[in-house]
């Protein structure tokens, strides 16, 4: 007990503070409980359906769970980006966590396919227009922290870009822009317009902040990355950039095209094309994949 008292006194002394003042505050404070610490009441009050369909609440909660998982992933990635003295053990641990969270995203997506009534979903989804999961900014921040910006441009985009484009110019050709930008007419969907008005400036600023510090950059800065690390990175890349988009695609096909109706997505995107990893060509660690593997990216023979 004496040891902890000395540690407390030293802690606040180093801050130029009187430790006794803080101890008095501790004496008068109430014990913490689970519901306040986790903010349970607030969390459970965040579902605000817009129709009478019961499964709309399931739809909202699932997307909120997804956003929390993405935040957990960003939390791990940001530690990699900010770590000054990065070693392999630290990196393998963090990538292992990212793999675990990605597997949770993939396995939990069954809720979207089988956890809602088919007819009810296809009724209440119409009130979501022009909102779309495409507008998840955390998804964009995460990929920008994982890899260099040019890796988020597919082959068609690379053909359009000039030589030595700056960050702002590269952003005009990112794979996800094609989900809401008709390059023939020059028109953008309201989904993309709203998203860019809300997040584009901060996404560009984030890209500049993490330049030369992304997870891919940290990999390339290692002199001799081990086989174990490479395998972890490849697994994360495959899960997040192939399996995760394919789960989205199959679920979209279930609701939008399973009866040959070919419904449009709420965000107005060409979902069959946009969601497929073969079109996105998003790879976080391209140096770890062979030319043949890249050519088969997202195919059933991969």
Image (cartoon, rainbow, N blue to C red):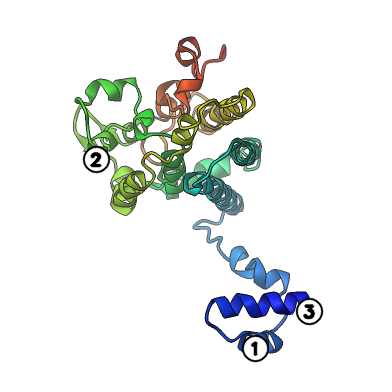
Q: Determine the residue positioned at 60% across, 25% down.
A: 226
Q: Which residue is mark 3?
A: 2
Disc 1 is placed on an element classified as helix
Label of residue 20 in the image: 1
Q: Position of residue 44 (x, y in %)?
A: 62, 64
Q: Is residue 210 above or below residue 178?
A: below
Q: Residues within 10 Å of mark 2 (few under 14, many from 20)?
A: few
Task: Locate residue 123 relative to residue 18 in the image: left or right.
Answer: left
Q: Quadrant of residue 126?
A: top left
Q: Position of residue 121 (x, y in %)?
A: 55, 43
Q: Which mark is nearer the camera, 1 or 3?
A: 3
| Left or right, 158 with reference to 267 | left
Does residue 201 appear in this view? yes
Which element is circle 3 on? helix
The Cα–Cα distance between marks 1 and 2, rounded to whole angstroms, is 53 Å
Numbered label attached to residue 138:
none
**Residue 152 screen position, x and y as percent:** 38, 31
Q: Residue at x 20, y 27 (%)?
A: 184
Looking at the image, residue 280 lies above or below residue 181: above
User: Disc 2 designates what residue?
Assistant: 168
Q: 42 and 256: which one is in front?
A: 42
Q: Are marks 1 and 3 in contact (CB under 8 Å)?
A: no
């Amino acid at each position: 007990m004496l040891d902890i008292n000395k540690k407390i006194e030293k802690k606040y002394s180093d801050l130029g503070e009187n430790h006794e003042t803080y101890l008095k505050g501790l004496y008068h404070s109430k014990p913490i409980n689970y519901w306040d610490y986790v903010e349970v009441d607030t969390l459970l009050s965040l579902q605000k359906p817009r129709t009478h369909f019961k499964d709309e609440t399931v739809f909202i909660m699932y997307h909120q769970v997804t956003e929390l998982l993405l935040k957990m992933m960003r939390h791990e990635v940001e530690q990699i980006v900010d770590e000054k003295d990065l070693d392999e053990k630290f990196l393998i641990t963090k990538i292992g966590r990212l793999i675990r969270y990605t597997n949770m995203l993939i396995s939990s997506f069954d809720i979207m396919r089988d956890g809602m009534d088919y007819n009810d979903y296809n009724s209440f989804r119409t009130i979501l227009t022009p909102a779309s999961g495409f507008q998840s900014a955390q998804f964009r921040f995460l990929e920008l922290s994982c890899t260099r910006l040019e890796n988020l441009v597919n082959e068609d985009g690379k053909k359009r870009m000039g030589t030595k484009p700056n960050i702002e110019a590269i952003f005009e050709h990112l794979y996800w822009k094609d989900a809401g930008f008709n390059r023939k007419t020059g028109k953008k969907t309201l989904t993309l317009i709203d998203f860019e008005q809300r997040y584009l400036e901060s996404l560009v600023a984030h890209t500049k902040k993490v330049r030369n510090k992304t997870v891919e950059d940290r990999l390339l800065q290692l002199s001799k990355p081990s086989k174990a690390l490479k395998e972890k990175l490849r697994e994360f890349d495959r899960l997040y950039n192939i399996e995760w988009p394919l789960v989205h695609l199959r679920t979209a096909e279930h609701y939008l095209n399973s009866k040959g109706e070919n419904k449009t997505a709420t965000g107005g995107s060409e979902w069959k094309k946009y969601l497929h990893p073969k079109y996105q060509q998003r790879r976080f660690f391209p140096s770890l994949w062979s030319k043949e593997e890249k050519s088969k990216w997202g195919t059933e023979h991969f």
